[in-house]
Amino acid sequence: MNELIQQFDKALMPQWERHPVPTSNSITHIESCLDFRIPPELITFARLSASYGSFFLSLGEDYASDTHILEKNCSIRMNEHWLMQGPPAPEHLIFITDNFMTDSFWCLDISEKIGTYPVVLWSPAMTPKQKSRRYGNFCEFVSDQIKYYEKTK
């Protein structure tokens, strides 16, 4: 995991302020509100990566921040997010990234409560028949993002 974090930090370079470090209280609160277990790899990543806030939503105690996982998931589900002109987001998706000026989000697919969730791309513009990009787990997803950002340098 440490090597993956180092590669991610090198590929993205911190671009914004760091999110507050997740605490055991914030993790418990998020899990209770969203009714799922946050993958341990995501928590470790949030605690140790200097570039985490450049890509992912906060898992810290900054609950009112528009870049917090609770705030983003709530605004999207209530159709209050500026992009939400289309169909509502599926209930089994937990948004883990911001949209970065596009209409796409990376999400954990918690349809099977297994603890290691696939990461999928979702957009309100997608039709139910469209296939989404899908990764088997969080680490596989991060590895592919590193490859992408290394190519764009």
Image: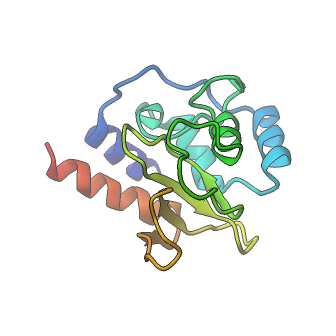
Image height of 126 relative to 35, above or below: below
Give coordinates of residue 49: x percent, y percent.
Answer: 46, 37
- What's the coloring here? rainbow
Name the side, left or right, on which 9 lies relative to 20: left
Identify the residue at horizontal 40%, vertical 52% (top origin).
Answer: 4
Give coordinates of residue 3: x percent, y percent.
Answer: 39, 51
- Which residue is farthest right? 32
Examine the image and state in which quarter residue 23 appears.
top right
Identify the residue at horizontal 63%, vertical 23% (top origin).
Answer: 65
Give coordinates of residue 139: x percent, y percent.
Answer: 47, 61
**Quadrant the C terminus occupies:** top left
Query: 91 or 14: nearer the eye?
Result: 91
Query: 99 or 16: nearer the eye?
Result: 99
Query: 97 or 151: nearer the eye?
Result: 97
Image height of 20 relative to 71, above or below: above
Image height of 84 relative to 118, above or below: above
Examine the image and state in which quarter residue 118 appears.
bottom right
Identify the residue at horizontal 86%, vertical 47% (top origin).
Answer: 32
Name the side, left or right, on which 33 lies relative to 123: right
Give coordinates of residue 98: x percent, y percent.
Answer: 49, 40
Examine the image and state in which quarter residue 76 appears.
top right
Identify the residue at horizontal 65%, vertical 63% (top origin).
Answer: 90
- Which residue is farthest top? 17
Query: 115 or 93: nearer the eye?
Result: 93
